[in-house]
């Protein structure tokens, strides 16, 4: 860059070089690349997992989760699948838990019993839970 200035009325001109005062360069340090964090996998807590004595009944479109805590259960059903409750003993454990006639048993211990399970397999599971609760008492 040049700067021209007239010193006097004569046609003489003094040329003064302009000094470019550049700002000092500051080197920026690049931050190290951060590796993406692995996705967090949430595991079900053991308390949330279905217990063997957790039953799920269906009534119309609604499902009701029931956890039996003692035996006998106090309910009856026919010897066929689907397992539909035909009688609830007054004052029995099933009545205490809100089980009603015509409810369909659909899960035991988190396992779907409606898919390809015979009545004898379902009854064996129910009986196993009942026996375990009797022994625990």
Image (spheres, rainbow, N blue to C red):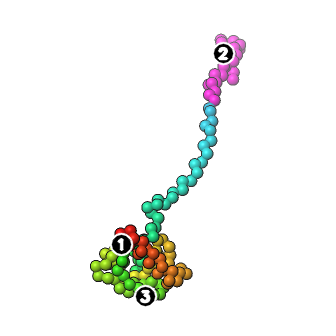
| Residue 7 in magenta stretch | yes
Q: Residue at x 42, y 84 (%)?
A: 84
Q: Choose top left, top right, bottom left or bottom right for residue 30.
A: top right
Quadrant of the rendering where the C terminus is positioned: bottom left
**Left or right of 86 in this view: 117:** right
- Residue that extends furthest to the front in the rendered view of this protein: 135
Measured as percent of width and height from the top left, residue 66 is found at 39, 73
Span shown in magenta:
1-27
Q: Could you say which disc has been placed on residue 83 in the image?
A: none
- Residue 118 in view (yes/no): yes
| Front in this rendered view, residue 25 or 53 | 53
Tell me the crowding category of disc 3: few under 14, some 14 to 19, or many 20 or more residues within 10 angstroms, Cα based: few
Tell us which disc is closer to us: 3 or 2. 3
Q: Could you say which disc has been placed on residue 6 in the image?
A: 2
Count the marks: how many? 3
Q: Residue at x 62, y 38 (%)?
A: 32
Q: Secondary structure at mark 2?
A: strand
**Left or right of 36 in this view: 92:** left
**Left or right of 45 in this view: 72:** left
Q: Residue at x 38, y 73 (%)?
A: 134
Q: CA distance from mark 1 to mark 2?
A: 112 Å
Q: Earlier in the sequence, mark 3 or mark 2?
A: 2
Tell us which disc is closer to us: 1 or 2. 1
Q: Which residue is mark 1?
A: 70
Measured as percent of width and height from the top left, residue 59 is found at 40, 80
| Front in this rendered view, residue 133 or 95 | 133
Q: Residue at x 42, y 74 (%)?
A: 131
Q: Secondary structure at mark 3?
A: loop
Q: Which residue is mark 3?
A: 78
Q: Earlier in the sequence, mark 1 or mark 3?
A: 1
């Amino acid at each position: 860059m040049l700067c021209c200035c007239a010193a006097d009325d004569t046609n003489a001109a003094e040329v003064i070089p302009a000094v470019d005062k550049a700002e000092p360069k500051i080197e920026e340090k690049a931050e190290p690349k951060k590796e993406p964090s692995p996705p967090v996998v949430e595991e079900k807590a053991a308390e949330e997992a279905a217990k063997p004595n957790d039953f799920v009944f269906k009534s119309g479109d609604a499902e009701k989760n029931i956890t039996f805590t003692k035996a006998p259960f106090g309910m009856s059903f026919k010897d066929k699948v689907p397992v539909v409750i035909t009688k609830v003993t007054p004052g029995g454990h099933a009545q205490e838990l809100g089980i009603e006639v015509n409810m369909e048993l659909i899960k035991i211990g988190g396992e779907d019993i409606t898919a390809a399970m015979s009545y004898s397999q379902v009854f064996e599971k129910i009986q196993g839970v009942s026996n375990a609760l009797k022994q625990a008492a």
